[in-house]
Amino acid sequence: MSTQLSSEHSQAIPPIRVGIVGVGNWARHGHLRVLSLLPQYQLQAVYSERRERAEAAAEEFGFKQVADSLTELVENPEVDLVVVLNTAPQHEQSVRAAIAANKDVYCEWPLTTRTTDSQELIRLAEKAGVRHIVGLQRRHAPHNRYLQDLLQQGYVGKLRSVRIHVSMNYFQALRDNALRWTIPEENFSSAVSIYTGHFLDMLFTATGWPTAISGEQVSQFAKVTIKETGEVFDSTAPDQLVLTGSMEDGAVASIQIEGGKRNGSGVQIDITGDQGDLRIINTNAFGDVGDDYLIEGAHGDNLALQPLPVPASYLRLPASNLPSAVLELGELYYAYAQDLADGTHGAATFADAVRMHRFLDAAKASSDSGQRIYLD
């Protein structure tokens, strides 16, 4: 498949008119900036429980309408795609409303706070015949598409091991008020819930998924203080996950997701095969301007790893100075627009979200029981 929308497609298909639900930090930092960058999209309508936020976003980014309610936004005939960007506990209600209005719907990860609720959203979306997209965007990033091709082309040969360590400075015992909603475990919005979902979906899209896992998840910050107010909350939400696992054909996996790391955080992935090795690193798990993934590899025996720059053919977004994490988000929106143009289904969907929900359920079950868990 071509990595770019053809000029005929871009001229024949009108822009996708977007209705946004929720305009918090990530909506403004990520979604609104990247949707403004992509010519395939038009910012049509916006809704927030705090109307002043919606009005401010409309003025800054050029929305044509400000909705007075969720119902008004999803039933707007000039909205083609509803983008749900409020907090995880609010996702289910917003997505249900979009589906009931027969609108295609994008929802941030985590899709919902419970696997069963996410499964129900798939059932409703399929029954309604609407397209559904989940914000597991990193699988679509240029470095990951290139990595997937390298593995499929046999760069490392038969896979022997996969190791990933992801850490971030966020989610410490002292947090900004903007992260208040990450404290309750029932909100399913911890460092483990969010970052495990994003990064393991990225990795397993390239390498394949484990067939069995065992490990432990822990909460090392039992008290969390809000920086701006001094409020102190009890928390049992996990901030660290350590797993080992087995993959098809005998490969092994080692996984560590670590929130609240003071120094030296980032991403490192090592992939070993019987013919070579690959290493993928980024000094920032979130990704600011210039925080690009670096791929190194060696095909052969006892060789030094050499840089493997991502070929220009994998770069498909308009030029910009946006942060790398925002550009990854742009890749998902690009994939959805290409799906509409070509009648394909390449963008991450609610089914991918449910698979990750089940994986995290298995990780928790292993931690709680001390047993090895076999995956479907």
Image: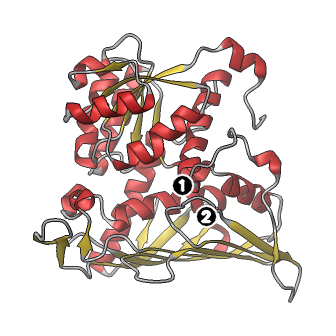
Q: Residue at x 81, y 46 (%)?
A: 313
Circle 1 sits on which residue? 325
> Outermost residue, bottom direction?
302
Q: Say what secondary structure mark 1 lies in.
A: helix
Q: Say what secondary structure mark 2 lies in.
A: loop
Is residue 308 among what the camera can see? yes
Q: Residue at x 40, y 43 (%)?
A: 28
Tell me the crowding category of disc 1: few under 14, some 14 to 19, or many 20 or more residues within 10 angstroms, Cα based: many
| Amino acid at circle 2 | Asp
**How far across and how far down the image is residue 95, in percent?**
31, 32
C-alpha distance separating marks 2 and 1: 8 Å
Q: Name the quadrant containing residue 85.
A: top left
**How far across and how far down the image is residue 241, in percent?**
39, 76
Find residue 102 and name its label: none
Q: Residue at x 78, y 34 (%)?
A: 2
| Amino acid at circle 1 | Ala
**How far across and how far down the image is residue 334, in percent?**
61, 35
Residues at badges 2 and 1 in contact (C-beta under 8 Å)? yes
Tell me the crowding category of disc 2: few under 14, some 14 to 19, or many 20 or more residues within 10 angstroms, Cα based: some
Picture layout, residue 347 above or below residue 254:
above
Among numbered discs 2 and 1, the one appearing first in the sequence:
2
Q: Name the quadrant containing residue 309.
A: bottom right
Picture layout, residue 355 above or below residue 316:
below
Q: Name the quadrant containing residue 156.
A: bottom right
Number of dots carrying numbers:
2
**How far across and how far down the image is residue 29, in percent?**
44, 47
Q: As drawn, is 33 to the left or to the right of 60? A: right
Q: As drawn, is 74 to the left or to the right of 154? A: left
Find residue 291 and name its label: 2
